[in-house]
Amino acid sequence: MAIARNLLKQLVSADDIPSDLESHYDASKTETPPGPSDFDKLLEEYRNNFTFVYVVFDAFDECSDENQKDMLALFERLEKSGYKLLISGRPQTPGKLQSQLTKPHTLELRANLSDLQRYVNKRMRDDNINDKTLKTKFLKLVKKVDGM
């Protein structure tokens, strides 16, 4: 948490960090951490200070089903409050999001096979791995990942 706080202070001056956010942070060190309603209140309050606020959620598909339900509810609240969301996940992710969010846009990103092969070759060279059998196995595996 200290790293996050220091990073936040580097991004904005100490005067720009709202006092209630700082008090929630300080209280979380010795007391029970803030609950969802506290976060909702803070998110709504700070949203009003900016024209656009972007929030990034990575690896949504790696959450448990129960956590995904909670996250979907959070996404819906954030979207209704005017937040711009970027949510990443594996190919099955869009179906779950489309039912919950208004007008979600999907962008499929896939790794290029030649980029993956270059990466394997470079890593093996950098790590001084000269085993041709191992290299062949790695390169076979790269072909099976299908851009993931």
Image: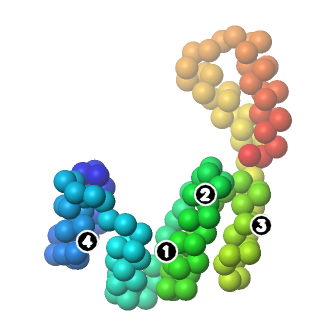
Q: Measuring from the top left, give residue 140's x and y in whole percent.
A: 82, 27
Q: Measuring from the top left, give residue 85's x and y in whole percent.
A: 56, 73
Could you tell which of marks 2 and 3 lies nearer the N-terminus?
Answer: 2
Q: CA distance from mark 2 to mark 3?
A: 16 Å
Q: Quadrant of residue 100?
A: bottom right
Q: Residues within 10 Å of mark 4 (few under 14, many from 20)?
A: some
Res 66 label: 2
Image point (63%, 22%), residue name:
124
Image point (78%, 39%), residue name:
145
Q: Relative to residue 73, is residue 51 depicted above or below?
A: below
Res 21 label: 4
Q: CA distance from mark 4 to mark 3?
A: 34 Å
Q: CA distance from mark 4 to mark 1?
A: 18 Å
- Which mark's residue is nearer the viewer, 1 or 3? 3
- Which mark's residue is nearer the viewer, 2 or 3? 2
Left or right side of 24 for 75: right
Q: Please report contact status of discs 4 and 3: CB closer than 8 Å, yes or no.
A: no
Q: Is residue 123 visible?
A: yes
Could you tell which of marks 1 and 2 lies nearer the N-terminus?
Answer: 1
Image point (62%, 15%), residue name:
129
Could you tell which of marks 4 and 3 lies nearer the N-terminus?
Answer: 4
Q: In the rendered structure, which amino acid carries the disc numbered 1?
A: Tyr
Left or right side of 2 for 138: right
Query: In this figure, which residue is indicated by the disc labeled 1?
Result: 54
Image point (60%, 52%), residue name:
63
